[in-house]
Amino acid sequence: MGEGTDQAGWRYRMSPLGFGAAAIGNLYASIPEQLAIEAIGAALDTGIRYLDTAPHYGFGLSERRVGAALAEFDAADEVVLSTKVGRRLVKLDAEAAKGSRHGFVDADPFEPVFDYSYDGVMESFEHSLERLGRSRVDILLAHDLGRVTHGDLHAHHLREFLHGGYVAMRELRDAGRVSAIGLGVNEWEICEEVLREAEFDVFLLAGRYTLLDQTALASFLPLCEERRLPVIIGGPYNSGALVTGTRGGGPIHFNYTAAPDWVIVRLRELEAICTEFAVPLAAAALQFPLAHPQVISVIPGMVNREQVDASVALLQTPIPPPFWQRLRAQGLLPAAAPVPMAGDP
């Protein structure tokens, strides 16, 4: 479908920097409600016009907080909003819901259950609208499909999605209740796989097109270019490795777990060049994905006003062209990877 289904002009309202709302679902740490809502208000004050959330983030908590913030700060309905389907939230006893579950701390009292069926997607969507306080969303994404994610159940979930959930998503788009449909995933391979069977408007790909991982570059991004499909990049810091680096003294996380040795080696090489050119590692990490012509937004997680201001500053940090040339020369970026030009931010 591509650009031909750009209902309501969502693409033209997108901001290059978006707000990833997983963290305000209490990912890894409990975030006070007012702090989370103020973070979204600060993001809108800076000109950010894209918010991404999901039922999975805090098991409804992130969507509730996004809804509360939009009610307060987005009366004109200017924000491009995406949420996801693919999990149903099953009610839990409040006592059983306390503590850390699936990486979220003191989240809402629900348990996420994968469900890519027609009825499961429709139910999930309606409950999301209730939490968000909206009658529609701009982008609806099928969440966390993929062979690495599901292992032996991959074929089952994909079949259920293509014959059920995908049909529901198309119906919602045709009815004008969403403007665009796509996938929100950590694996570029599943995006290519579904494009052999179905049509989509957009993809949100996390962690696979960063300074540490450019595996999406060889075939997936060229396929999107050929089909004129926009891509949103999540996880630009690969779970924090490209913010903390190796010099912060604390643990280094990569793809939601402890960083392997090859990541440590690569980070040290990146840090040496960043030091030489006086470029913050996080600034390079945030700006790099946006240089690709198919990438329309990059969405780091943010939990407070300070992180919002820091993200905006990183995106606007001047980076001299010789910096990117050095990364290529040392084999840290492939020659085919587009890099920012002077003045891009």
Image (cartoon, rainbow, N blue to C red):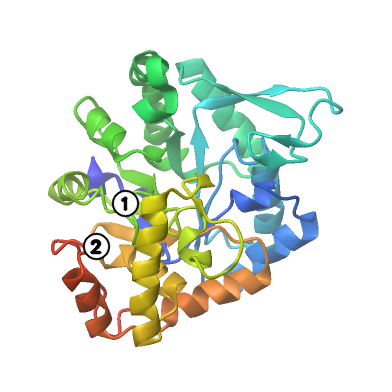
Q: Which mark is residue 231?
A: 1
Q: Position of residue 155 (x, y in %)?
A: 34, 15
**In the image, 321: left or right of 25?**
left
In depth, the one of 163 and 340 nearer the eye is: 340
User: What residue is drawn where x is 43% and y is 48%?
Assistant: 260
Which element is circle 1 on?
strand
Q: Position of residue 165 (x, y in %)?
A: 42, 22
* Disc 1 and disc 2 in contact, CB within 8 angstroms: yes
Using the rendered image of the protein, determine whether residue 287 is visible from the camera's viewpoint. Answer: no
Where is 43 relative to 325, above or below? above
Nearer the observer, disc 1 or disc 2? 2
Q: Which residue is mark 2?
A: 292
Q: From mark 1 to mark 2, how far is it between C-alphas?
A: 9 Å
Three-letter amino acid code at disc 1?
Val
Decide which of 297, 318 is in the foreground and name it: 318
Rendered location of residue 269, percent (x, y): 34, 69
* Residue 249 falls in image quadrant: bottom right
Amino acid type, residue under disc 2 in the picture? His
- Kind of element beneath mark 2: loop
The first of marks 1 and 2 along the sequence is 1
Q: Is residue 102 left or right of residue 50?
A: right
In the rendered image, the quadrant that contains the C terminus is: bottom left
Residue 165 in view, yes or no: yes
Rendered image: mark on residue 122: none
Q: Residue at x 20, y 64 (%)?
A: 331
Disc 1 crowd, CA 10 A, few/some/many (<14, 14-19, 20+): many
Q: Is residue 302 left or right of residue 16?
A: right
